Image (tube, grey):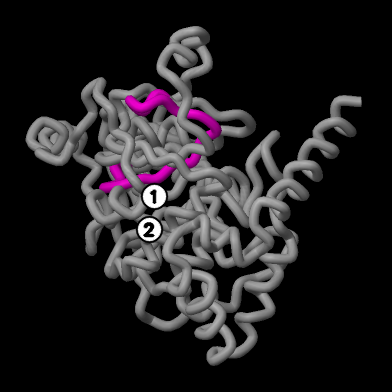
Amino acid sequence: MMITKQGSGGLFTDPDPDKARLFFRNDKRNARMMKSKIMPLSRAMDWFVRDGDYLAIGGFGSNRTPIAACHEIVRQKRKNLGFLGHTSTHDMQILSAGEVYDRIDISYGVGLEARGLSRCSRSYMESGRVTVTEWTNYSLTARLKAASMGVPFLPARQMLGTDTFERSAAKQATCPFTGMELTLIPALFPDVSVIHVHEADCYGNARFNGIAVSDIELAHASKRLVITAERIVPHCEITRNPDATLIPFYLVDAVCEVPYGAYPGGMPYEYFSDEENLNAWLLAEKTAEGFAEFIQREIFDCKDHNEYIGIHGGIQRMIELRNKELLIEKEVIV
């Protein structure tokens, strides 16, 4: 192919699929056999998330996002991470508060959808301490898809002629078959990813409800994958309905049982998002001093996600959010 143009953005990960295969072959921490992978979340984040790694977070916006894992990464003071800002909202807000990443592939971030903009994420992105490469939502999905297919790039017909292309790390090339111009989108192999699901067994066979976005591609593309689950179910429950398994055990390195692990975000058919909590973040961000105290109380003073939920009303609050989610589900069905 003849390369006719390329974006000016940095490429933070190597798109070579053979190097990824070599990693899987040689990585001594890789535990993807069919054996129990259950461990505490703190241990999984300590073992699999290292300073300098490229991190990806699953979920969609504030839905089914592994917030407990984001808190733990900040709590453990990880630094110099790369970050996949695909459909990032509250997860990016948390990681920005901890200043854990210094480079980001971004398509949607800073905004918390209809709730407003995160001053914390915006100021950190504008600080000059973060290297930014821009993409569209689809192109980031295509990057993960290429990695999951074991190819170094995928061709697409998008971003051409846009400022997003100019700030991306994609290339423009002439198709050898038709002569049309195409975007070449490089594969993305995250060093470590965390995906929150409804259920998983001890081996890592995982299933979830609701929109998948790019989590299936992300699971296949990731060099290491930590599953956080609302509940651990017996393996016989998985084999009873094998078609429901969306992420198989051989893609998974660790399984952590984290009830309400997406809180204060929502979990489809489980619990609604805590809008009061999410709004409290936006209010706290208005002053640097107030926000520092807020983060200390919300993250560092909590030893784990159970304590975090406890300071926000505990199980009674979760029952209220569960009832709200089930009521909305009933109204939709009717």
Q: Which mark is residue 83?
A: 2
Q: Amino acid at mark 1?
A: Ala
**Residue positioned 86% across, 26% down in the render:** 333
Residue 220 horizontal side relative to residue 206, left or right: left
**Residue positioned 47% across, 19% down in the render:** 245
| Residue furthest top in the image | 240
Q: Which mark is residue 56?
A: 1
In percent of width and height, residue 191 lies at 26, 47
Asked whether disc 1 touches disc 2, contact meaning CB atoms under 8 Å apart, the reply is: yes
Q: Is residue 144 visible?
A: no
In percent of width and height, residue 276 lies at 74, 65
Query: Of residues 27 and 308, which is closer to you in this image?
Result: 308
Q: Is residue 333 visible?
A: yes
**Residue positioned 11% across, 39% down in the render:** 27
Secondary element under disc 2, as helix, strand or loop, is: strand
Q: Which residues are magenta?
A: 187-205
Give how far apart the Cα atoms at labels 1 and 2 are: 6 Å
Considering only vertical position in the picture, is 60 above or below 82? above
Q: Pick the quarter of the image with the C terminus.
A: top right
Considering only vertical position in the picture, is 59 above or below 156? below
Tell me which corner region of the image, top left, top right, bottom left or bottom right, holds residue 79.
bottom left
Earlier in the chain: of badge 1 and badge 2, it is 1
| Residue furthest right in the image | 334
Q: Amino acid at mark 2?
A: Phe
Query: Of residues 230 and 177, which is closer to you in this image?
Result: 230
Secondary element under disc 1, as helix, strand or loop, is: strand
Q: Which mark is residue 7?
A: none
Tell me which corner region of the image, top left, top right, bottom left or bottom right, holds residue 101.
bottom left
Q: Pick the quarter of the image with the N terminus.
A: top left
Count neighbours of disc 1 (C-alpha within 10 A) and say few if under 14, some if 14 to 19, many if 20 or more. Answer: many
Considering only vertical position in the picture, is 43 above or below 323? below
